[in-house]
Amino acid sequence: MYKYSIKRKRPTSVLDSGTFTGCEICSAVFPVDCITIIKSDFNLFAIFCMCVCVGIYAGCDKKSSTEPEDTCPDLGTTPTKSSEWVGFVNWDEATRVELSGHEVSSASYKFNPAKLEFVAGKPYILVLKTETGNTAKHYFHAPEFYKAIATRKAQTIHGEYKAAYFDDFELKTGANELELYFVPVKAGAYNLVCTIAGHQDLGMEAVMTITCGTGLSLDLEVDPSFTTALGSDPRRSDSHAVWTTAEEVTLTMVETSATDYSFSPDTLTLTAGNAYKLKIVNPEGNSSKHYYTAYEFYKTLVTRKAEDSEAEIKVPYFKAVELLIGGTTELFIVPTKTGVYSSVCTVDGHIEAGMTGTVIVQ
């Protein structure tokens, strides 16, 4: 039997520390640094992975992502509201876990790994990835899972997106990433599929399990003034006729000086019932990230998606959108309620520096 020893202490569980990825053959989960070392010698990697796939422990130790924790953590007095769960944990101790959309061949697609396990009450950063060489975009569709977790934010290289919960994520063709910061709460096994036609049939499905969450409560804190019908409005579909006449509007975050910030234009005038692609830009030359927070406005919209160069993010409504330096995103929206709404950047000191604006829906 081939054996190659790498001296590295294995974490208590594959989800306890570090960053993990899956075997390219069988989706078994390993520490990324372990796989990197082994893959430096292709023949050795092939031997290693073949051995592991038939249950022989060679090289780095393997532990199944579905193996239960020895014990559940003692959480003490537990929160119930999503925002409380997010504030309850120590994000410096968050575990990074990678989940990749992998195209093995034109006849075989898969999520890698195909099984993931999360422990309720612990913070995680789930890195959704597509790979160089992929020829298709892929959805990471797990709506019930997204409602079983307390979400801090979703983040790409362009910005941060905040919502009560997320409906869906689609990663674009090629090598792209989105990070989902969350605390799992409600115990259960949740299906993940790619909903693009034919992709599930090619094998693109997985299971994400939350353990230790029995008896825990989660209030997603959906604003009671949000009209739930907006979440199922047919105009959320890209095939709806309203998008054939969508108007493009650009808003730029301007830094005139260290004490003079603004939105340009500072007033947006929109028409209820019309579709818009609102492009928000934080130029490369700026010195700070900036929020475009228009909470009362966001709640009145039919929100199809936010889209940047990495991903599409789908939510019932946004709470806030933050653009990193050099970041650009587009919000695909249909205003539904006339009125005057305020917009601000909520980064400390930026309102005082003048970063405020108005949205008029007529």
Image: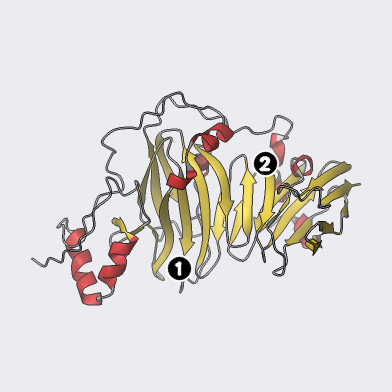
**Quadrant of res 215:** top left
Local packing at callout 2 (Cα closer than 10 Å; few below 14, some 14-19, many 20+) is: some
Identify the colour scheme used: secondary structure
Say which element carries label 2.
helix
The residue indicated by pointer 1 is 131
Local packing at callout 1 (Cα closer than 10 Å; few below 14, some 14-19, many 20+) is: some
Q: Is residue 200 visible?
A: yes
Q: How many marks?
A: 2
Q: CA distance from mark 1 to mark 2?
A: 31 Å
Q: Is residue 4 left or right of residue 151?
A: left
- Residue at x 51% of width, y 70% of height: 174
Say which element carries label 1.
loop
Under mark 1, the amino acid is Glu
Q: Is residue 321 left or right of residue 6?
A: right
Residue 25 image offset from top left, x and y in percent = 28, 64
Of 136 and 197, which appears nearest the observer? 136
The residue indicated by pointer 2 is 231
Which is more foreground, mark 1 or mark 2? 1
Of 235 and 181, which appears nearest the observer? 181
Q: Quadrant of the N terminus?
A: bottom left
- Residue at x 49% of width, y 36% of height: 148
Residue 307 image offset from top left, x and y in percent = 65, 59
Q: Is residue 105 above or below residue 274?
A: below
Residue 9 image offset from top left, x and y in percent = 23, 54
Under mark 2, the amino acid is Gly
Q: Is residue 88 above or below residue 50?
A: above
Q: Is residue 196 visible?
A: no
- Residue at x 25% of width, y 69% of height: 38
- Residue at x 16% of width, y 55% of height: 55
